[in-house]
Image: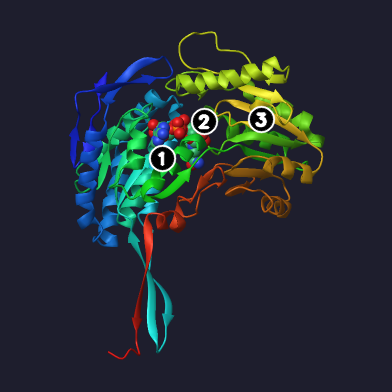
Amino acid sequence: MTDYKNLIDGEMVDNGEWLDVLNPANEQVVGRVPACGKDELDRAVAAARRAFKDWRKTSQEERQKVVQGIAAAIKDNADELFRLLTTEQGKPHAQAQQEIYGAAGLAAAQSTLTLDDVVNQDDDQRLSRTRRVPVGVVGGIVPWNFPVMMAIQKIVPALVAGCTIVLKPSPFTPLTTLRIAELIKDVVPAGTVNIITGEDNLGPMITEHPDIDKITFTGSTATGKKIMEGASGDLKRITLELGGNDASIVLPDADVEKVAEQLFWSSFSNAGQVCIAAKRVYIHKDIYDDLSKAIAEYAKNVVVGDGSQQGTGVGPIQNKKQYERVLELIQDAKDNGYKFLTGGTKDPSGTGYYVPITILDNPPEDARIVAEEQFGPVMPLLKFDSIDEAIERANNSEYGLAGAVWTKDTDKGVEIAEQLETGTVWINEFMHLSPFSPFGGHKQSGFGAEYGIDGLKEFTYPQVITVKRDAVV
Ligand code: NAD
């Protein structure tokens, strides 16, 4: 077991109080991290505030060099990092590898983003331009499903925009992030990036801290609402990336065999613990029987197990609380007599938070397992008659994160996409996020955006400077 320290003001430090971190595959302690409170937070915020004075004045090139250094540190240590990520998060090695390389790629790509001045007026009377100025010290709060990706997607745009950051990983998955902290300690100027760990109660201290200017948060909608409330005291800027209950709509012209495999992974990748996973799959009645059979057949060959073992396709649920929630939803479906194509039982092995691949055959629309975000290896297949009906059912959710349409007729796919009330819609693919396109939720899936220029702007204020040309002075 290793102790992982926090990064505050350019130093790896601890406070002598520790939190245990478990491996969800076997419930063994795999590491300890500092249990921080107000004192450590104050020190981290003060360091970020001091560092902001110089960092805000750096050129785009200087920022780019630092961020590229972060990308290189992650990439050069990818082998160690993805194994550690599997150990604390549970995801299979191949998926952990994707996350690590994805985070390095995101950092490299986003280092190239720039926010140029915009000229509003340039005539005899005045020259007016809008520039973007960094908001200041950012508080970043991230969840446990993609701990590294989420940390990087907060740290990188903050630095590129000229802000400094205090980041809090989830208490369930802080290890890989703190190892990255150690790797980048001498890459980033002291105080620009601070990473501190603690229980959930550290979150509200960040949200309410008077010397933090902006909160960027990824996590549940319930916590997002608390953050909005906490940040309202001093009107902090906020970006909230929250929950989703994404619908996939499969039209009758879709190729059953090909779509079956893709649909499977759109629901079961990362054991379904993905905000943009397909959590409701609407299939046209003409292909419902064939496609549901093909998905269930495909599922038979996917191994649920320890993510560090070769051949595992679906790992454990990341933590006990979420494990119990997913089992509760499955039990509710059983109690209501809904039909299961696979799964629906508890793993008998005893240790590890394993949930069998669970596919439901056309449960009612108001079933809890359909209406709520499952965030586990659960896929309700739902039959529809007409496209208008599918669109209406897909939109019948408090969430509005993403969705997908599967069809050979891509024009039709786009026509449907334009009627979906979500921030992102894919035609014939899923979960693809570009570093250059904005990603964010409609309705209760979020507030603001990440990625791309829109995401970068969220770390800045607009400032308009106007020079009166014909002034009499
Ligand atoms: P969570 O809301 O329980 O926790 C997220 C983070 O918030 C953790 O670091 C936690 O310690 C902290 N936190 C908890 N209570 C807090 C409070 N009162 N104030 C401030 N911070 C607090 O979420 P989770 O269970 O870790 O993650 C799963 C959820 O995240 C799912 O709903 C999922 O859909 C969502 N998610 C969304 C996206 C997206 O981009 N939209 C991405 C990944 C996950």
- Point 19% across, 43% down: residue: 186
- The residue that appears at 55% across and 20% down in the rendered structure is 303
Instruction: Name the quadrant of the C terminus.
Output: bottom left
Residue 29 image point, x, y percent = 33, 16
Q: Which residue is mark 1?
A: 150
Circle 2 residue: 273
- Identify the secondary structure beneath mark 2: loop
Sooner in the amino-acid sequence: mark 3 or mark 2: 2
Q: Quadrant of residue 294?
A: top right
Q: Is the CB–ligand 1 distance for label 1 below 8 Å? A: yes
Residue at the image position 69 percent from the left and 15 percent from the top: 335
**Beta carbon of the mark 2 residue lies under 8 A of ligand 1:** yes
Q: Is residue 189 left or right of residue 171?
A: left
Q: Specify few, some or many for label 1: CA neighbours under 10 Å numbering under 14, 14-19, or 20 or more.
A: many
Q: CA distance from mark 1 to mark 3?
A: 26 Å
Q: Amino acid at mark 1?
A: Met
Q: CA distance from mark 3 to mark 2?
A: 15 Å
Residue at which label 3 appears: 370
* Vertical arrangement, residue 334 with respect to residue 38, above or below: above
Query: At label 3, which amino acid type do we have?
Result: Val
Q: Earlier in the sequence, mark 1 or mark 3?
A: 1
> In the structure shown, which secondary structural element does the residue marked by tag 3 occupy?
helix
Which image quarter: residue 145?
top left
Label 3, residues with CA under 10 Å away: few <14, some 14-19, many ≥20: many
- Position of residue 239 measured from the top left corner of the image (x, y, whole percent): 44, 48
The image quadrant in which ligand 1 is located: top left
Q: Is residue 395 visible?
A: yes
Q: Which dot marks residue 283?
A: none
Q: Quadrant of the N terminus?
A: top left
Outermost residue on the front side: it is 233
